Structures are given as C-alpha cells and as structure tokens.
Image: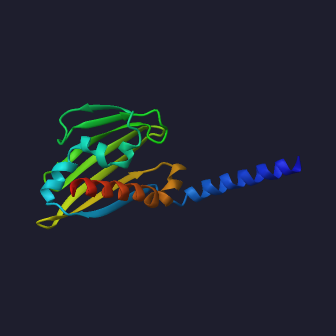
Amino acid sequence: MKIIKKILIVIAGIIVLALVAALFVSKEYSVKREITINKPSQEVFDYVKFIKNQEHYNKWVMMDPNMKKDYQGTDGTVGFVYAWDSQKDDVGKGEEEIKMLEEGKKINLEVRFIRPFEGLAITEMTTEAISPTQTRVSWGMSGRSTYPMNLTNAIMDSMLGADLEESLGTLKGILEK
C-alpha cells in the first residue's frame, strides 16, 4: 500500500509542477517557416490563394482523405470558408476562412478549431519575388492558448514548424514539376 501511495504522490507532484510551469509560459504562440520555389511569384500566389489546393500539399488536410469537407463562397476570395469534420482525433473538426487577401502577395486565414479542442489561430501565407523565376513563400501560424494548455506553447515551434516545413516541401514539389 505504501508503494501505491508513493506513486500517487509522485503523479500529483508532476501534475502540480506542470500547472506551476504553465503559469510562466506565454499564452501566445507564433510559428513561421519559409521555402524558395523556382517559379514566378504570381504563379505561386495563384496556386496558394485557392484553399482547395491545400488538399495536395497541406499535411493537416491530407491526414484523413475520408473526412467530410464543406465549402461556402468562392474559393480564392475573402469570405470563402472551408470546413472539415473527421472521425480521426488528430484531425478533428473545424473551419478556416479567408479573412484578407492582398493580390499577388498575401493571404490570411482564420482557423477555428472545434474538436478535439476549441481554439482560434491565424495563418498567413506570403509570396515574395526573389527574382523573375524564384519566389520566397512564408507560412506562419499564430494564436493564443488558455491556461494550462499554454504549456504546449513551449514546444509549439518544433511541433507545428515540422508540419509547415513538410507542407512547404510538398508545395515546392508540386509547383516545380
């Protein structure tokens, strides 16, 4: 019985330590990755501004080919909404909406997570001509986590960053074919 009591005390101590640590972790997170694509800037932008194209390069969208998808509005324009609903817990349910579009340069999306957790994030994708045949694509995500979930913000850059890098690499492969 003493061993069980010690194990429970250790577990409680770990939980308390995590809750205290979360008090000191920022509630804000921001992750950004870049890649150079050997195509003209306008051609790259004309591909990424269409949210439906994410089905071909966005790791998160490709995680469940059987998820239910719904679209409202005109893709590639402000107000377009893409909603998803998956039975897979790591995909969940949510929607993203084009909130701002600066033709040839930038697209901002508001991502609303519903399940497995509620949350709100802003993603921004920019295209910048490096030369007439090369484009720097930046993709970032920022948001706010409530206590104690903000504890995950300490590792958010490595978690989300790897997925952004993989997705950008896939995008590069598609556009440079």
Q: Nearer the viewer, residue 8 or 146?
A: 8
Q: Nearer the viewer, residue 27 or 59?
A: 59
Q: Is residue 37 left or right of residue 18?
A: left
Residue most toward the right? Answer: 1
Residue most toward the bottom? Answer: 131
Give the residue drawn at x 18%, y 55%.
44
Residue 65 on image: x %, y %? 38, 37
The image's colouring method is rainbow
- The image quadrant that residue 54 belongs to is top left
Residue most toward the front? Answer: 177
- The image quadrant that residue 119 belongs to is top left
Residue most toward the left? Answer: 132
Image quadrant where one finds the C terminus = bottom left
- Count every numbered label the image shows and give the total: 0
- Indicate whether 99 appears above or below 137: above
Residue 128 on image: x %, y %? 18, 63
Residue 5 on image: x %, y %? 83, 49
Give the residue drawn at x 22%, y 57%.
126
- The image quadrant that residue 110 belongs to is top left
Residue 26 on image: x %, y %? 47, 59
Q: Nearer the viewer, residue 49 or 55?
A: 55
Give the residue drawn at x 13%, y 51%.
103
Q: Is residue 176 left or right of residue 113?
A: left
Q: Nearer the viewer, residue 168 or 15?
A: 168
